[in-house]
Image (cartoon, rainbow, N blue to C red):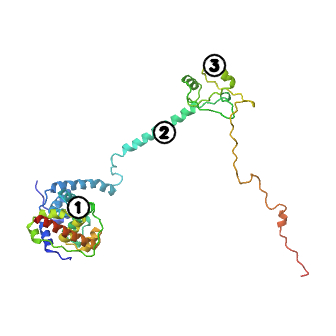
Amino acid sequence: MDQKKPYEQTITSKLEALPLPNMADAIWARIEAGLDSDIPGDDDDGGNGPDAPRPRGWKLPVSFVIIGAAIVTVFLLNKNSSVRDNISPVSPGEIPVSTNSPAIIQPATPPANRQQNQQGGQSPGITFAPRLSSQDSLNAGKNDSLAFVPIIPNVSPDSSLKRPVSPPIVVATDTPPPGKKSKGVKGVTDDDYKIVPAKKDSTR
Amino acid sequence: MQAVEYNMDELLSGCVAGNRNVQEAFYRHFYSFAMTIALRYSRDEQDAGDIMTNAFLKIFRNIRKYDPSKGTLHSWIRRLVINEGLDHIKSRKRFSEEVEVETVADPEINNVALQEMGAEEIMNMVKRLPPATHAVFVMYAVEGYNHREIGEKLNISEGTSKWHLSEARKALQKQLEHLKY
């Protein structure tokens, strides 16, 4: 089985005489290109010391990163300072006193009011919504002005405009109420644990 | 431009030193020898060019490792070109199909018909074989490897190598019959 057959010898001899393609120059150009690409890698691994030139092209990305970091830092600092400037102390009269609804986000404020609010030093996006009492509702037709005036609601025990109050949440816990836990068993004092050596019985 | 003649020691030492002119002389000296081997493992000249390029890059990168006491420079180059050719064949799809046969039929091939054929015709017949069968046939029938060595090189069993050789013989016989009529 492993012996070479006559036809195999014929094939071998024929293949030895196979005409070669004229590709020597083209192949050498590719080999040369491959060898040229090896040279920088070899130099890098050779460890030429501190005098060896650093590869080009590293400065640009590094400078981009530094500039980007600086821009982000300046932007964040400016943003923080502007937010701090926009925050002004709010007088108690501006906040409607209500136990149920302290504040409402009101995005649809007319531009005139928004401008007014901004002049007042408040944040333009969030304003305190006026709460109208029953009397204010009656007067609404007379007063066409949309001026934003915080109004303290009249809350009375008899008021029919009571808001539903959510029931208090009771959290069931198995743990006893906090307090100092008494030590030991009731009725037993430290003296009960005192060990006194028994007196020697001379009779024994 | 006049080509500079180098003896073998100068070629070797120049290649080790990375002298580009000596490397080119070395390549041109072994071009015919290496290309003849590369063509056996390729389907066309482009494949052979790829095998040659990769093989000579490996030769120049590893020429420091060449040990004259372990064999001639020709056998070292031949081994590298064959390995590159096998890698090239392996990269073709459907190489690693697992087949195992216990008894291998041994078809007869008309040697007279082969002798009448030209080298290119025979090479075209071999190129039509499936990749693994092509590799086994060339390694066994042309390069002279045995089935154990082929199995080690191609990561296949000896039985699989024998099966591929049998398949190659059958396919070549079929092609010869087809050509005859």
- Of residue B130 and residue B151, the one placed in the foreground of this image is B130
Quadrant where the image shows the N terminus of chain A? bottom left
Q: Is residue B104 left or right of residue A93?
A: left
Tell me where residue B31 sits by quadrant.
bottom left
Residue A15 in sight: no
Local secondary structure at mark 3: loop
**Disc 2: which chain?**
A
Q: Residues within 10 Å of mark 2 (few under 14, many from 20)?
A: few
**Disc 3: which chain?**
A
What's the residue type where badge 3 is placed? Answer: Gly
x then y, percent, for residue A36: 25, 53
At 15% across and 65% down in the image, what residue appears?
B175
Q: Residues within 10 Å of mark 1 (few under 14, many from 20)?
A: many
- Of residue B132 and residue A44, the one placed in the foreground of this image is B132
| Position of B68 relative to A21 (above/below) | below
What's the residue type where badge 2 is placed? Answer: Thr
Report whether mark 3 lies on the same chain as mark 1.
no
- Of residue B45 and residue A52, the one placed in the foreground of this image is B45
> Of all residues shown, which one is farthest toward the front?
B181
Q: Which residue is mark 1?
A: B55
At 23% across and 67% down in the image, what residue appears?
B133
Q: Which residue is mark 2?
A: A73
x then y, percent, for residue B169: 19, 70
Report whether mark 2 lies on the same chain as mark 3.
yes
The tally of labels here is: 3
- Of residue A113 and residue B4, the one placed in the foreground of this image is A113
Tell me where residue A186 sits by quadrant.
bottom right
